[in-house]
């Protein structure tokens, strides 16, 4: 394996500490777990690394590229200037600098990050999605006969379950108005309310550029009482281990899926990957209701620390963590060599 010069591009507040081992008790590591794990994997792989932090200025990125001449940029930025909608600006800049990078291209990021736009495109290609309504900031919310409760209210652009809580599942107009107002206030962005789909929730990772590989499916399972918490991956569910333990909520590999359904899920995710113009790696969030497959969200460049669903799926497929990181690098080099 050729040793490369890899520029690790991260948010300026998420530069990992100089701790060579994952056994460190340093709480600072938890804040930048992905950056820490990827950095350590690159070291173990023998690559030369330069970590570059950025927030709202492209100058540090340009300086690192011009002075260090990396073979590839490992892109871990999820926002620019505090706005998740601007992540594709940075990738567009890397394109203009003619430097290979890992993960998704600018158009794919733009199409997939917008939960409404991606649903429109997927629905046009006969992939089922929940019915939805977008509520721009400062809009007046009037009753709509198309609304069929219950609805889930979330941010149009934010990821990581930002703003999703127990109160996000609404059953009447006033609850909807209050929750939309809340999303506007905490994200300073638009809100989306979508039909709540009962059923199993799966997370499916797709790896590749033109030839795509679907990794083993993950699932969130709510084993606690049905009247305990809403069966949605809220911010608390996603990030609070104690909360999951209290309510017996498990992330695990999907079980007991009939082979024909599994094949349809894989085919649907591959189609969605191509429809949205994605490349590199992406995770799709699905709900399975009887035999119907509903696409909830497309997530280009999902989390890839050692405990994330995409990473665990890669390991289940036979790629240990270091090989998974190397595969992401190879995909980035491959698509930019054309």
Image (cartoon, rainbow, N blue to C red):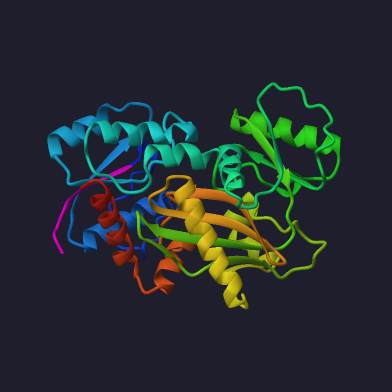
Which quadrant does the N terminus fall into? bottom left
Residue 288 position (above or below residue 31): below
* Rendering coords of residue 168 (x, y %): 73, 45
Q: Nearer the viewer, residue 172 or 146?
A: 146
Q: Is 155 rendered above or below residue 235?
A: above
Residue 111 shown left or right of residue 196 in the figure: left
Residue 253 visible somewhere in the drawing = no
Residue beneath the point at 50% across and 49% down: 299
Q: Is residue 72 rendered to the left or right of residue 190?
A: left
Residue extent of the magenta highlight: 1-9
Which percent across, then down, holds residue 331? 29, 55
Identify which residue is drawn at 14% across, 58% down.
Answer: 3
**Residue 195 is a magenta residue:** no
State the residue in front, 222 or 201: 201
State yes or no: residue 5 in magenta. yes
How many numbered marks does the figure carry?
0
Q: Looking at the picture, how far across and down is residue 305, in whole percent?
A: 41, 58
């Amino acid at each position: 394996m050729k040793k490369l010069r890899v520029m690790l591009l991260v948010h300026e507040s998420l530069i990992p500490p100089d701790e060579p081992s994952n056994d460190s008790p340093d709480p600072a590591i938890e804040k930048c777990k992905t950056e820490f794990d990827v950095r350590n994997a690159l070291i173990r792989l023998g690559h030369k690394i330069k970590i570059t932090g950025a927030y709202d200025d492209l100058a540090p990125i340009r300086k690192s590229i011009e002075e260090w001449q990396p073979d590839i940029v490992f892109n871990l930025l999820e926002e620019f200037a505090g706005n998740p909608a601007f992540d594709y600006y940075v990738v567009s800049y890397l394109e203009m600098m003619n430097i290979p990078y890992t993960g998704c291209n600018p158009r794919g990021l733009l199409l997939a990050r917008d939960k409404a736009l991606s649903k429109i495109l997927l629905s046009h290609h006969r992939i089922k999605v929940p019915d939805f309504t977008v509520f721009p900031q400062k809009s007046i919310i009037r009753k709509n006969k198309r609304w069929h409760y219950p609805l889930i209210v979330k941010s149009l652009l934010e990821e990581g379950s930002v703003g999703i809580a127990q109160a996000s599942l609404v059953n009447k107009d006033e609850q909807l108005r209050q929750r939309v107002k809340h999303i506007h206030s905490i994200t300073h962005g638009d809100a989306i309310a979508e039909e709540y789909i009962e059923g199993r929730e799966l997370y499916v990772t797709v790896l590749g550029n033109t030839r795509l590989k679907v990794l083993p499916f993950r699932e969130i399972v709510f084993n606690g009482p049905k009247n305990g918490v809403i069966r949605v991956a809220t911010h608390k569910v996603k990030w609070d281990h104690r909360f999951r333990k209290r309510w017996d909520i498990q992330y695990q590999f999907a079980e007991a899926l009939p082979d024909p359904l599994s094949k349809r899920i894989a085919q649907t995710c591959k189609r969605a990957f191509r429809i949205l113009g994605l490349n590199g790696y992406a995770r799709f969030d699905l709900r399975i209701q009887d035999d119907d497959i509903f696409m909830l969200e497309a997530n280009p460049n999902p989390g890839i620390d050692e405990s994330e669903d995409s990473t665990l799926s890669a390991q289940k497929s036979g790629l240990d963590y270091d090989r998974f990181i190397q595969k992401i690098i190879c995909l980035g080099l491959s698509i930019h060599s054309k």
